[in-house]
Image (tube, grey):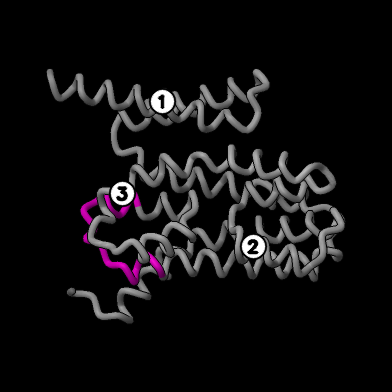
Amino acid sequence: MRNTSSTALWDGVKRALPIVLGYVPVAFAFGVLAVKNAIPPGLAIAMSVFLFAGSGQFVAVRGAGVGAASVVLTVFVVNLRHLLMSASLAPYLKPMTRLQKFFFGYELTDETFGVHSTAFQRGWTLVVPTLYACNVTAHASWIGGTVAGVFFGGLIADVKPLGLDYALTAMFLALLVPQCRSRLHVLVALAGATLSVGLSLAGVGQWNVVVATVPAAALGAALQTREKAA
């Protein structure tokens, strides 16, 4: 392996830095929201340590007081997109053991998926410590932001004027742009976004992203196959 251990770890940390900039304010907002919904500080922090699912955590907090089954089902639906992400990364992770894949998957999020998939598509050779360093750095920043929100969120009456609620959306856009390397990628991205927004306005709810992703990806695959055949 060409990379030394320290170089591989530092490479992973550097890859996670843009994610950290987005995670800290969003996690801070989560900590504030959790406290305002009467969730104990320790439990809110534990959610960020063990659950580590941004949208899922917000769903759980907003569902405080309703049935546990409803919260679990909603979080399950919201996180169905991980099936698509795992299928996308699986070919690149074949050299890893099952245990390595387990710990990698435990800390995989939309943002780290975007970073890893972009690296693999550009020809990067798998370096396991780099993957872990990226994931752990992102996770640590999420925990840190939650701790700050839980204990210092009371100093801020409303996080919206600070634009913290848009930080995660902005980060997703920043991760999407580098992956749009051709007109086909742009078309698929626009098709998925348009369909997702349309489904959301139609009242589909949390299913909109998952439902929109499948036909958009199918469209991209069909067009790519047609282009290769031509």
Would you place residue 208 above or below residue 168 in this image?
above
**Residue 95 location, quadrant:** bottom left
Instruction: Mark 2: give few (<14), some (14-19) or many (20+) Cα within 10 Å.
Output: many
Q: Nearer the viewer, mark 1 or mark 2?
A: 2
Q: Which residue is mark 1?
A: 216
Mark 1 or mark 2: which comes first in sequence?
A: 2
Residue at the image point whose x is 69% and y is 64% from the top: 146
Instruction: Name the residue type under label 2.
Output: Ser
Q: Nearer the viewer, mark 3 or mark 1?
A: 3
- In whole angstroms, how far apart are the C-alphas of marks 2 and 3? 26 Å
Q: Amino acid at mark 1?
A: Ala
Assign a secondary structure to mark 2.
Answer: helix
Q: Which mark is residue 39?
A: none
Residue where numbered disc 3 is placed: 90
Q: Which residue is mark 2?
A: 48
Mark 3 residue element:
helix
